Image (cartoon, helix red, strand yellow):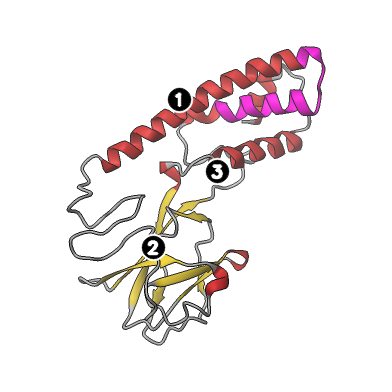
Amino acid sequence: MVNLVTAVLQGEAPSQVFILQLLNTEKNIVENLRPWQVLKKLDTSVTVQATNTYTNPLPLPADFSKFLLEGTMQLFDGVNDTQNISQVPFEARLTYRTAFGRFLADYANNQFFLMGLIPKAYSVYLWYIKSTPQITLGTTWTSFPPQYQAMLAFRTAARWRLGTDFDDVNARNADENGRTADMILQSMETWDTDLAISAINSVDYRNDNYPGPAGGQGPTGSWYGPRGPRALN
């Protein structure tokens, strides 16, 4: 990708180290624009026992960026018992300490805590948006298809021309680089929207036990996703 940035800049490029810094800055910006479908991930590496308490820290995945929706987690016993867990604020730890069905996240230390008494052993099913590795001289932008890789190069070129090596010529070239990057990004967003629509086309929000992003309640009475206040256990 460094070579592509250099080509866009027609050889007028900073050091490779600086190019990589700009590329990774743009990568991080784009990845946080929306919950991209290809960045969704499930972790099931954590198990909890009936001895677990609200003071017991549990690890978030190493590549954790943020939860899907407003905190998405389930407990599964491996047979038929599924418990839907929703997130509460970090500072509400004592308020919800007895409330089974809630959890809080300690983002600074990359860990979370399950509230209340766990009735038996479960595996934690944690859905989240992952972070991707930094781009290096020997790697490229992982997770996203090759046809969108050039978008980062054009964004990086525009950023360098406008912010580091500004002059009238670079300003005009930066506008064109920016427009090209925007068109690729729009195509990328359309592709991601199509993936998202495909995933929910067959969901019956009235009858299925999956209320969707807005939250709700299925026929079994169990909740999934964002929900309102619930009485403490």
SS for callout 1: helix
- Residue that mark 3 sits on: 32
SS for callout 3: loop
Residue 83 coordinates in the image, percent (x, y): 30, 70
For image coordinates 65% across by 35% down, the residue present is: 23
Q: Quick one: quadrant of the C terminus?
A: bottom left
Q: Quick one: quadrant of the N terminus?
A: top right
Residue 229 coordinates in the image, percent (x, y): 40, 67
Question: Relative to 177, is 208 above or below?
Answer: below
Alpha carbon distance from label 3 to label 1: 17 Å
Closer to us: mark 1 or mark 2?
A: 2
Q: Specify the principal SS of the magenta part.
A: helix
**Who comes first in sequence, dot 3 or dot 2?**
3
Which of 214/224 is in front? 214
Quarter-wise, where is residue 216 in the image? bottom left
Circles 3 and 2 in contact, beta carbons < 8 Å: no
Q: Magenta includes 168?
A: yes
Q: Which residues are the magenta region?
A: 150-170
Residue 18 coordinates in the image, percent (x, y): 75, 36
- Image mark for residue 187: 1
For image coordinates 58% across by 64% down, the residue present is: 107
Q: In the image, what residue type sits under mark 2? A: Gly
Question: Relative to 138, is 121 above or below?
Answer: below
How crowded is the residue under tag 3: few (<14 C-alpha within 10 Å), some, or many (20+)? few
Alpha carbon distance from label 1 to label 2: 36 Å
How crowded is the residue under tag 2: few (<14 C-alpha within 10 Å), some, or many (20+)? few
**Who comes first in sequence, dot 3 or dot 1?**
3
**Who comes first in sequence, dot 1 or dot 2?**
1
Q: In the image, what residue type sits under mark 1? A: Ser
Quarter-wise, where is residue 174 in the image? top right
